[in-house]
Image (spheres, rainbow, N blue to C red):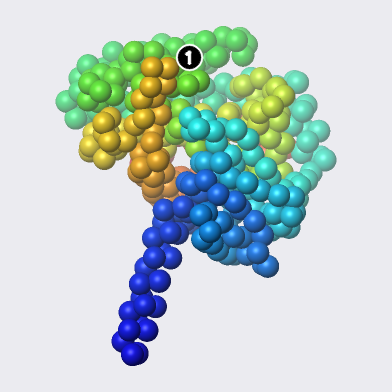
Amino acid sequence: MNIVIYNKFLIMTILRYIVWKVVLWAMGSTRYIMSMGELTRKDNSLCFRKDGKNVYIPVENTKEIFCFNEVSINTKLLDFLSKNNIIIHFYNYYGGYSGTYYPREHYLSGKLLVKQVNKYNEDRMSIARPIVRGIGLNIYEILYHYYKHDKKEVKETIDWIKKNFIPLVDDAKDIKELMAYEGEVWMRFYSDFKYFLPEDFVINKRVKRPPDNPINALISFGNTLLYTKTISSIYQTHLDQRISFLHEPSEGRFSLSLDISEVFKPVIVFKTIFELVNNHKLQVEKHFEKNVNYCILNEEGRRVFIQAFEERLENVFTHPRLKRKVSYRTAIKLDCYKLIKSILEEKEFVPFLLKEGM
């Protein structure tokens, strides 16, 4: 009798674990909801309900929630999230970013806000220029890795970055000129994919909304994940999300997150993509949903990508100034602090450089 009860208990435990893994995925302090359902408050916990089954989410060590399906919420939940400083991000059917709910800002600084606005008005280029330079240098390091491994075809691009791109960026007179050089370095980067990715993942043209082929689907999904991760990092500082320097501040988006995340795209988004594709962990027939007008990752493809993306964020390197190991997740927040020092103390802003993190 005891054996039967024990086995029943074991089976129920296994079933609960399977339900947890299928509908809700925990990675560190992040929770990923992959299925349709309802998210509510239950006493001092969160409860995700799907098909009559409850999955409980402890608020301890939960900092952000990603919803990749239709999820019903209510104001009682939002109030509970606010009190526990939990951010929730919403995505549409195509894996595109829909929006973020984050609690009332608790790191407020009127002094920094005024200085951030003044920096934008009076000295915007001193922040925007290093960001564009950092993008180019980090792309250089990614391509140089392949050059060292006998992909000599990328030499033209890495030579152009050092001999042409960097001087052009350093001499740029305004934001429009900087953005033009940024666009060119990304286009040259994309054009080199054919030298080290399988034919199924070669890019002909960058298409975003919605993506039209597997590589565009991966880039869009990865960039969106990084963008929302950066929103969460900025939320933990005194910076204002709306006041950016390279990208134009505008209504309906957190443009500072676009600025901060740019230099991390080569190391976090693209290294994740290249390793998944070249190691055949993502396959066109198995992990993508294709239609006449779009191509997106299916649910299994998103799981594979998210796991690799989170592992990449937790990779560590020895920080050249701090002389200790930090993760790429921490490096994003450190760039926020470097920006604050630049705004308040007129320190030179030098964003994350991959060469320092290798």
Residue 346 appears anywhere in the view: no
Residue 122 appears anywhere in the view: yes
Q: Quadrant of the C terminus?
A: top left
Q: Position of residue 79 (x, y in %)?
A: 75, 54
- For label 1, count other residues whose C-alpha is less than 10 Å away and answer few (under 14), some (14-19) or many (20+): few
Residue 332 appears left or right of 271: right
Dividing the picture into quadrants, the one containing residue 244 is top right
Q: Position of residue 314 (x, y in %)?
A: 42, 50
Q: How many marks?
A: 1
Q: Position of residue 203 (x, y in %)?
A: 33, 18
Above-or-below relation of 157 to 238 = above
- Residue at (48% x, 14% y) in the render: 183
- Residue at (33% x, 79% y) in the render: 7
Residue in front for this viewpoint, 336 or 53: 53
Q: Position of residue 129 (x, y in %)?
A: 57, 21
- Residue at (77% x, 33% y) in the render: 115
Above-or-below relation of 5 to 165 = below
Residue in front for this viewpoint, 25 or 204: 25
Hey, which residue is sitting farthest left in the picture? 150
**Residue picked out by circle 1:** 183
Dividing the picture into quadrants, the one containing residue 190 is top left
Residue 149 appears left or right of 66: left
Residue in front for this viewpoint, 143 or 30: 30
Q: Quadrant of the N terminus?
A: bottom left
Residue in front for this viewpoint, 276 or 357: 276
Above-or-below relation of 230 to 17 = above
Q: Which three-letter amino acid code belongs to the residue tagged 1?
A: Gly
Local SS, label 1:
helix
Hey, which residue is sitting farthest bottom in the picture? 1
- Residue at (60% x, 10% y) in the render: 176
